[in-house]
Every structure is written in structure tokens, then in C-alpha cells.
Image: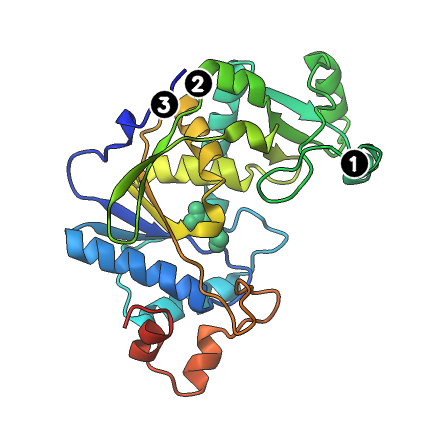
Amino acid sequence: MPPSTAAAEPAAGRRVFRFAPSPNGDLHLGHALSALLNHDLARATGGRMLVRIEDIDTSRARPEFEARILDDLDWLGIAYERPVRRQSAHGPDYRAALDRLAGMGLVYTSFASRGEIRAFVAARPDWPHDPDGAPVYPGFGRDDPHAAARTRILAGEPHALRLDMARAIARAGTPGWREDAADGTPAPITADPAAWGDVVLARKDAPASYHLAVVVDDGAQGVTDVVRGADLFAATAVHRLLQQLLGLPAPRYRHHRLVLGADGRKLSKSEGAASLRTLRAEGATPADVRRLVGLG
Ligand code: GLU
């Protein structure tokens, strides 16, 4: 099936932008660029601006970070609609999407531990890796009978629900998307979801993976424009495939340049990149932050 970008036109009406931080640390300059771009584009186009708290990973999300993030956004002068959507409040929405995909025969249960996957891949030096650099899942469990998996799930075994990528592509094709450059020039992108292999959709203790949650949320919130960092460009192929399977409209996408640290590497919360809070404490103004991220 040829890539389809025809569906990538936004619905008529006001455009809907969103900034979707994960509350597992303080915002840094990379987040500021994302949030400010969304805000500026919403303002320039008479669109709506939403904030979504991506707290589906309860092992990492902390309410105190959410409060600090919202406070930083207020300080930056970013106006957004309230109440904000929190993923932790929408388990049933993700479950319903998962059930639809399962009903199409596209979901299987895998019980392989990370150690088992590592050992399998270590013995095969040429094993393929996904765009994030993780080994493509070897498919353990893909052909197991459903009833056997059900018994193991009921017995409480740790497991992941995975998308059968080959079948999903056979059903939906490889839907492309419209990517807007920094100056707004649109370009059609051909998606390559196969490179990701059988991605995780949910786990025993997590009702949805990032990929599933983001697609369900963007659909539920009527998001027409996804503006986010270039590190999520490759994942868009998976998102478009899931949107197609779930009958959700295709947003337009714009993946912006990343803000790099003095060492030329991407800023990261875990490596202690200077947070907006630190900059604020040192006396920076919102205008300084705009300048620092190149929006001066
Ligand atoms: N929650 C993701 C992050 O903080 C962003 C997801 C998205 O914009 O699609 O990196």
C-alpha cells in the first residue's frame, strides 16, 4: 500500500496544540522550546493550547514535579486550557483501544523477561535494533495460544502486551504523515513502523505504553498539531500506524531541533541539565529563556 498523507490535513476549525511533559523531573530548556513553540503557534493561528501530564509511568511520575512544571509554564507566560488531562485518570480509554486492537487479532502476550531477550540477542551479533537503539523484540509468544497466555496472566505472571507489527502493517499499510519544517513548509514523510518491531502497548502494571497513550490522548483531545522534539520523529511511524488502526485522524507534525548542552549533547533531566528553576533562581527572565532557546 502506498504511504497516504492525504488524511494528514487538519480538521476544519481551530487548530489544537499541546505540550505533553512527563512529571519525572523539572523542565529544562528543551522543554521550554517545545512549550513556547506550541504556545506561539496556537496564538499565531488562533488555535487552542492544551497541556497534558504524561504520568502513565507511575514508577517515575511524581505529583510534586507536576506542580513545579505547571508553575514554570505560568512563569514562562504560557496560557493553556484547564483542567489539564492526566494520563493516570484515563486507564479505561487505553484499555478500550487495546481491546479494539486485540479484537483485530493484532495483540499478543509476551512473558519473556528483559534478561531472556538480552541473552537471545547477545548470541546474534547481527540482530536488528529499533530507531531508539533497543534490540527488536524477537517475537517470543507471538504464536502462543491465547488460552495459555490467559492462564499465565491470571496467575499474575509479569507480561507485556505487544503489537504484532507485521499483521498490523498488513492491515493498515504504512501511513505517512505531513511534517512541517521550522518555516511551516510541509513535506510528506514515508513511515517505517516495521523498524520498531513488535512494540509494547501495555504491561502488567502499566495500562498503556507511551505509544498507545499518546495516540489515544491526541485523538481524545482533538489535537491537530503535534509539535515536539526531533527525538520523537521516528516514533511517529508507530503513532500513525496506531491512529490508522484505531480510526483516529492524523495530526500534522513538526519535530523541532533539540536544545543541546555545552557539550553538544541533548539535554536530559537525568544528567542534571540546568532546569528552568535553576535559571529562575539565578535571576533569568522569561525573555532570557526565549533568547537561550533561539526564539529571541
Ligand atoms: N511525554 C513526552 C516527553 O516528555 C512527550 C510526548 C509527546 O510530545 O508526544 O518527552
Residues 180 and 10: in front is 180
Q: Position of residue 212 (x, y in %)?
A: 50, 35
At 21% from the left and 44% from the top, the residue drawn is 15
Residue type at tag 1: Pro
Residues 256 and 61: in front is 256
| 10 Å crowding of disc 3: few (<14), some (14-19), many (20+) | few
Q: Position of residue 5 (x, y in %)?
A: 31, 28
Residue type at tag 2: Ala
Q: Give residue 172's mark.
A: 2
CA gap, disc 3 and disc 1: 39 Å
Q: Earlier in the sequence, mark 2 or mark 1?
A: 1
Q: Is residue 80 visible?
A: no
At 39% from the left and 87% from the top, the residue drawn is 283
Q: Which residue is mark 3?
A: 247
Mark in the foreground, 2 or 3: 2
Instruction: Tell me: residue 250, above or below residue 99.
Output: below
CA gap, disc 2 and disc 3: 10 Å
